Amino acid sequence: MNTEYNPSELLICLASRVMEDGNTAFIGTGIPMLAASLAQNMHAPNLIAVFEFGGTGAILEKLPLAVGDTRTFNKALHASGICDIMESAQRGFIEYGFLGGAQIDAYGNLNSTAIGDVLKPKVRLPGSGGGNDVGSCCWRTIAIMKHDKRRFMEKIDFITTPGFISGPGAREAAGLPPNTGPYRVVTNLCVFDFDEKTKRMRLISLNPGVTIKDVKENTGFEILVADNVEQNAPPTEEELTILREKVDPDGLYR
């Protein structure tokens, strides 16, 4: 078994480890799907994966290609539609939301709408989809990002998905539910949480071979650093075997 791994495989494994058995998790297209499937096959067999187009509690035996793929209903506990799923999040029934984006700031606000002026953008991105609903209503959101200064910015071009907006109390002032918001940011360099007092991103663990200096040099804003920065374990042989042979044998996302 080749135990060498690429950055995408590391991201998938790190995101999978965050998923807890028995919890509900809003799963998006791409890496979150692989992470959820890996978690179901490893440590979280009772993870309830929730998909935007209505599948709740699907068993991810074959990798869906998108959130609207019929495989997101495979052996599901419940099959409904997008309105029911979003209402479930609004009513507080979904614990985790896994999100991506092109840009993120220190407070966990995400941009997946446009690069540059939103009225005359340099690049038009896919847009919100359910990203705003997930970030607004799930109890804890986890962003999965490639890490560089173009993505980790002091001020993002547009807020598609609210994080802690501008700091303590800002989510509540905007009318969002209390005790919700960003929980983790998982990148190819490290993992962040958010400081309880300032609501700013805080470095808590480093990926193999990465230093605190590396993280700072690739981040466009000043980061907080935990007193005890841990080291993330590399993907295990078991994780890589399941990922490559069972979760994504065709290498669609790796």
Image (tube, rainbow, N blue to C red):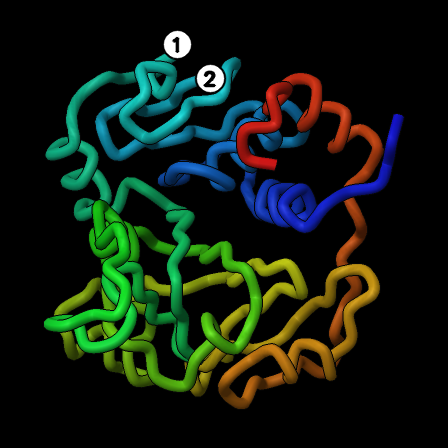
- Percent x, y of residue 129: 21, 46
Q: Nearer the viewer, residue 159 or 57?
A: 159
* Residue behind mark 1: 75
| Label 1 residue SS | loop
Q: Amino acid at mark 2?
A: Ile
Q: Position of residue 110 (x, y in %)?
A: 34, 66
Q: Earlier in the sequence, mark 2 or mark 1?
A: 2
Residue occupied by mark 2: 59
Q: Is residue 179 visible?
A: no
Q: CA distance from mark 2 to mark 1?
A: 6 Å
Q: Is residue 203 left or right of residue 111?
A: right
Whether residue 214 is visible, yes or no, is yes
Residue 22 pos. (x, y %): 49, 32
Give, as a three-letter code, the residue at label 1. Lys
The secondary structure type at the circle numbered 2 is loop
Circle number at residue 98:
none
Please report contact status of discs 2 and 1: CB closer than 8 Å, yes or no. Answer: yes
Mark 1 nearby-residue class (10 Å; few <14, some 14–19, many ≥20): some
The image quadrant where one finds the C terminus is top right
Which quadrant does the N terminus fall into?
top right
